[in-house]
Amino acid sequence: MKQREIKFRFWDRDGKEIVNELKGFAYKGINQLFDDFLNTKQFIPMQYTGLKDKNGKEIYFEDYVKDENFSAYTFIVKWNKTKISLLNISNGDIIDIDNINNLTINSNVYENSFKFTPKHKEIS
């Protein structure tokens, strides 16, 4: 079984943008680097799921996605105990990701360029 690539992007609270690289942080080993980066409280990590949408764009946790099979709904990509799931922001339904070829990324919970007002944000 092939392991997924472990990588992160970060929401910069001050700059109000996604940061894909850890520039300006001295490399002291990945654990220390990650701790230093997060201790600034300026950045919120978003982990890569190892999946890509139908356009080849990397899917991260907290991304808003549309699924062609459920076109009327928008979902947030979440970790659900043992697997990646989609949380319907309108009704709270949880669905498994069966076919990533049907997914398209719209935004993420921090940028929210579509100005969604989710009724549900977390899996309970």
Image: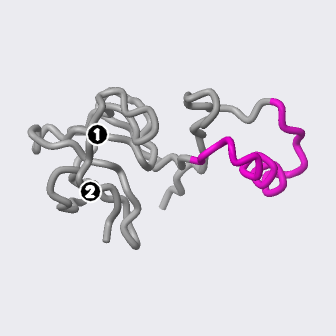
Q: Is residue 8 left or right of residue 102?
A: right
Question: Looking at the image, which is closer to me, 62 or 28?
Answer: 62
**Discs 1/2, front:** 2
Kind of residue indicated by mark 2 = His
Vertical arrangement, residue 3 with respect to residue 17, above or below: below
Q: Position of residue 84 (x, y in %)?
A: 37, 59
Q: Is residue 101 left or right of residue 26?
A: left
Q: At 19% across and 41% down in the image, what residue appears?
A: 67
The residue where tag 1 is placed is: 65
- Where disc 2 sits, the SS reads loop
- Where disc 1 sits, the SS reads strand
The residue where tag 2 is placed is: 120
Q: Which mark is residue 112?
A: none
Is residue 63 at all visible to an observer of this figure?
yes
Kind of residue indicated by mark 1 = Val
* Magenta-colored span: 24-45
Q: At 44% across and 36% down in the image, what residue appears?
A: 58
Q: At 54% across and 57% down in the image, what residue appears?
A: 3
- Is 39 a magenta residue? yes
Q: Is residue 29 left or right of residue 108?
A: right
Q: At 79% across and 51% down in the image, what residue appears?
A: 30
**Circle 1: is it few (<14), some (14-19), or many (20+) Cα within 10 Å?**
many
Question: Looking at the image, which is closer to me, 120 or 78?
Answer: 120
Q: Is residue 47 left or right of residue 102?
A: right
